[in-house]
Image (cartoon, grey):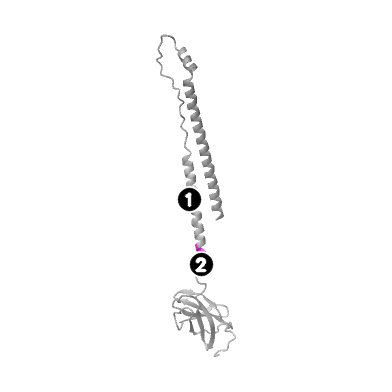
Amino acid sequence: MMWLILLISILSLAVIVLAVLVAHFTRLERQRSEARVAALASAMDNQLWTDRIEDAEPPGQTTTSSPMSLVAPEVERPSRAPAFAIAAVVVLAAGTVLFVGMSSGRRAPQQVAATPASAIELVSMRHVLDGETLIVSGLVRNQTAAVTPTLSAVVSVLSRDGRVMARGESQLDSIVLEPGKETTFRVSVSDVGDPGRYRVAFRNGNQIVPHVDRRSDLARTALANDAHGN
């Protein structure tokens, strides 16, 4: 962003300098033209100049040559207007780019702030190992000001070395939550064998819905030391 501001400042200064130079040279050209016209007018009105021309012609002879022009030819000078116009267009384009960039920068934080950091809160959760079946249940709350999409709870069981060995999924009791409402979930995962721990997530179709863990007891998800059947 700073380089755009610097670029516009430099171009604006260049345009100002160019405008001053154009005005200066235009004034000089006008003064020179007026000086030439005044000098030629003074020469034509000078009687000595007229007498010298008449004395230069022999008596009784008529000059057949073409009359001498006393008007100095105007030298056509290239106009500086195109350069001024190009510089002005460049400054305008750079200003437009800067305005768009600053507008985009202002809109981005607003869009991020409008996106909720999390959709639901995990209020409580517990688990039971029944043989080789893990049963996980809990309570969730919708903390946002909007209705949640259709939600399901997904429990992934990990082995002692961290590999996912089994997974189960079940819809929440109230699959759609109104703002501020709570609901429960219960997920059974069979054939877990010798599990190490588990983790829970919430999903809407194929999209993971973020959540915040609000459990006061922060119940353990480790299963290695749990007795089967408890």
Q: Nearer the viewer, residue 199 or 91?
A: 91
7 above or below 139? above
Q: List x then y, in percent, for residue 56.
A: 47, 13
Per the rendered image, the range of residues in magenta is 107-114
Q: Which residue is mark 1?
A: 93
> In this view of the protein, which residue sits in the foreground, 194 or 226?
226
Work out how far the residue at label 2 is from the one at label 1, CA to CA, in angstroms: 29 Å
Label of residue 112 in the image = 2
Residue type beneath disc 1: Ala
Describe the element under mark 1 as helix, strand or loop.
helix
Q: Residue at x 48, y 41 (%)?
A: 83
Q: Secondary structure at mark 2?
A: helix
Q: Residue at x 52, y 36 (%)?
A: 25
Classify mark 1: residues with Cα within 10 Å, few (<14), some (14-19) or many (20+): few
Q: Earlier in the sequence, mark 2 or mark 1?
A: 1
Does the magenta portion include 144? no
User: Which residue is depicted at the point 55% across and 49% down?
Assistant: 9
Which sits in the foreground, 26 or 89?
26
* Above or below, comparing residue 59 to residue 18 in the picture: above
Residue 109 belongs to the span the image colors magenta: yes
Please state the horizontal and vertical placement of residue 154, each as a whole percent of the image.
49, 79
Location of residue 220 in the rendering, given as x and y in whole percent from the top left corner: 58, 83
What secondary structure do most residues of the magenta stretch adopt?
helix
